[in-house]
Amino acid sequence: MDIPLVEPGTVGPCPVAPDALQGIKRQQTNPGRWNGPNWPEFAAALRSQGVELQETNAARAIFATDAGGTAHGLPHGVVTARSAAQVAQLLRTAQAFRVPVTVCGGGLTTEGESVAFGGVLLDMSGMSHVIAIDAAALTVRTEAGIFWHSLAEELRRQDLDYLSAPLNLTSSVGGTLGVGGIDVNSARLGCSADQALALQVVTPTGDIVECSDTHNAELFQRVILGYGQFGVITEATLRVRRYTPLRMHYFYYASLRTAIEDLQVLDRNDASDYSGILTIMDCAVNVLVAFDSDEREAAFMADWRPRLRGHGELSFGLRTLIHYILRPWKLGEAWYLLQRKRELFPELQRSEYMHDGTMFDRSVVFSRAVWKFWGSRQMVIPDLATSAEKFVEAVERGNAVCRKYFAHYTLYLVGIRLRPEHRAHYEMSCIPPDAEGWAYGCEFEPMFDDRVYSRDYLQSFKNEIYDIGVDMGASYYRFGGMMKGYIRRVFGDAVVDRQLALKRAADPAMILNRHVIF
Amino acid sequence: MQPRLGNGTARRPADFTACSGCGLCLLVCPVWRRTHDLGLTPLGRAKALQYGARATDIAASTESCTLCAACEPVCPEEIALVAMTLDLRSRLPQAAAAQVRFAHEASNAATAPMPPPPAAAVLLPDRALRERPATLARVSALLGGASRIALGADDGADIALALEAGVAIPAARLERFLQALRRATTIVAADGLLLRHLRIWLPRARSVGLGEALSRLPAVRGRLRASDLYVIEPRAYHADYQRLVKHYDGLRAAAACAFNLDLQRIAVPATARSLAQRLGLEAADDGVQLRWILHGRKIARVVVENLEDGAAFEQAGALPVVHLADLADDGTSA
């Protein structure tokens, strides 16, 4: 086999199993393991400063893979973050000894971005304390390793809530701010990363720096949506709001295009407080909307509900029944839809999370359902993020790829309100450069149904989805780790080289999350 | 991977191999709250086992577990996490220390008089309840008195301790304990860990926790105030979560009081103790848990199902504490 030489810091074609790919040059890059020169000296130097370093197999095994379960690697040692000063000690020492440091928050990456292929795994969950809540100013200062749900638990004791966070209880604040974060209110409030007011960051060379839009703004711009390249977020100040339960409505469509068009009309007109689409394949397309107040709900029902082309549950059920009666060869698909409805719908309406028709904790309801019905030891969730205008085509093309590879799958679609003043944050991120006003994202989530798929099969699936992005000038949420071969193809050499130069200046030894992007 | 929706397959009991690393168990784990050390959590144990760790490699983690069982109802893979921890404990050489204690208690139990003829219902108090005869008498009376519920002469305290330590229970001892319960249609158990196993050993009997039994009584629930903090005993609650979450949700709607429940409706343990603390080898330190339960709440009184929890709150000293059984006789109640 002819294995091409690849210059460090660049990405070359992967020679592994090229025949597994379907029509494109393979770009999977599961990084080589760092071989550990200077490790004993580094470990001794770290310990001499009082930094606890765990090297047992049991401690390292916890971080051997991420939520995706397809990238596997072991760190040489694990450091549990306890303070910014300790993280600074670690990074200074790692620079001196050129030891890679991989940062892990909730470990919910799917492409191996939080997996250490040698070196140190920095477990940020050790920094999980809420520092101060200012109920009058509606802000919270928190350590950045905290899970969003743990933050919500604290905020709720003061009748407060975060603005926007991934529908996943164990996403960490720091990890989310580094990559984006979408919620079903992102069409109104923007991505979670846009909620940050200020950060404490430990730079790759070990300086502890406070930054915001007005103070060390350049660092703030680079760290927000920076995929962990320019520093470790150790504390964050976030906007919060008064807590409100929400009232949710579901409308059912048989057409992706129609549902997306209606969703975008709702978003453009600020018709609801929450909006998104969740599907069972492309057979049952569910537009969900929700409201923080009775007034907003009443206004929606009066002004927008009549214009929606979706149906209520009963009406859609009858239409679907007729559809399958006329197509008896699709009985298997009909049976699957019925089973899924019977098992999933009650989970979304569990009485302990609902009171008087309102949902008390959307993240609890959806996150529990996500892990129960979609989670497993392997997950791939390729995505496409486009401008509003390109979104229907991107989703329809991605849907066709899902149909080709898997019997069952789910699509999760949501809009992201863009903040013009944060344009600098968005460079080389999930926000596509041509998006104005809103960007739209779609996650393509195959169901494995107890089948075992090879990593190459899954990689081929992801590649076909991502090729659509290259073809359409889109972007991706998960472009790091094993998908980083697409970075130059989708963002272009000029942008990537500029970011790489910034990275080299900020991180001379290229130690911090070094295999994630570059 | 566990069976998923739409394939028509029932879920199987899962073991550590099914752990996907979602981390939902961390959110409810009292050891995690205290230490923020992933290695001391169910996730840490499962992941270590997946990558070849032996029981002795993760002994500190296994022994730190409080067996509150909060992790089980939140685990999307439905892994039997309590059974996993007990199995790991049984593989540790340290279990021998507890075995000595078990053997001692077993011999005491063996010399105890045989239990009275079984009634339709049997009450199994735990050690703390036995040490409070007045409260025990009130519990018995509230549950119908001697004519309706028999006080188990053999309360299985040594068996509960053996379960806690992961020590094998001699078949003869277990049989002797269960013999007195076989004809009972209802068993009310104060020990949540014992209750979990009674449901397995005696599937035909209706085994309920003391907290549930008392909180269903109008004489008790009618005395709850909106300014109360009601502290659910977590082991019994989490062992039968799907059913009991509805019971306590109803109680919350009726009484409008606060509960030691988090946003996932998981009970936050007041007394979260490691194996060494349960065995009395280390001092208990419930401060982190008590502070978190009380944090940001405006309450006037703590109502407990479990006397050990009550003692911890009394020691904290901030609020009056009352056991559920004492509520019915509380002359100061509205």
Image (cartoon, rainbow, N blue to C red):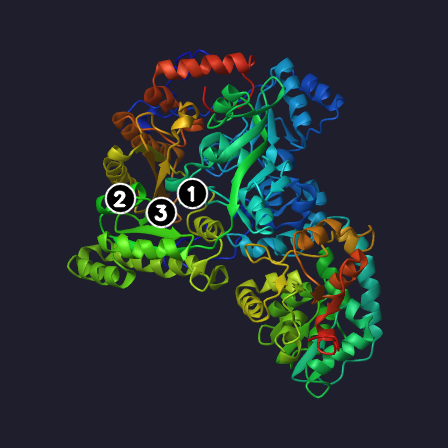
Kindly give the residue lying farthest to the front in the view shown. Answer: A136
Q: Nearer the viewer, residue B252 or B174?
A: B252
Q: Is residue A36 above or below residue B159?
A: above
Residue under mark 3: which chain is it in? A
What is the CA distance from the residue labelled 3 to the residue labelled 2? 11 Å
Q: Are marks 2 and 1 in contact (CB under 8 Å)?
A: no
- Badge 3 density bin: few <14, some 14–19, many ≥20, Cα 10 Å: many
Q: Position of residue A450 (x, y in %)?
A: 40, 49
Secondary structure at badge 3 equals strand
Discs 3 and 2 share one subunit: yes
Say what amino acid the circle numbered 1 marks.
Asp
* Image depth: mark 3 or mark 2 in front: 2
Q: Nearer the viewer, residue A220 or B139?
A: A220
Residue under mark 2: which chain is it in? A
Secondary structure at badge 2 equals helix
Please say whether residue B206 is visible from this viewpoint: yes
Q: In the rendered structure, which disc, 2 or 1, sits on the residue that comes first in sequence?
A: 1
Which residue is found at the position 65% from the left and 28% from the top? A84
Left or right: A317, with A213 as reference point: left
Disc 1 target residue: A183
Disc 3 target residue: A275
* Image depth: mark 2 or mark 1 in front: 2
Kindly give the residue lying farthest to the left in the view shown. Answer: A326
Disc 2 target residue: A265
Left or right: A41, with A203 as reference point: right
Query: Which quarter of the rendering shows the N terminus of chain A?
Result: top left
* Number of dots carrying numbers: 3
Q: Are marks 1 and 3 in contact (CB under 8 Å)?
A: no
Discs 2 and 1 share one subunit: yes
- Badge 1 density bin: few <14, some 14–19, many ≥20, Cα 10 Å: many
Q: Nearer the viewer, residue A229 or A207?
A: A207
Which residue is found at the position 60% from the left and 50% from the top? A158
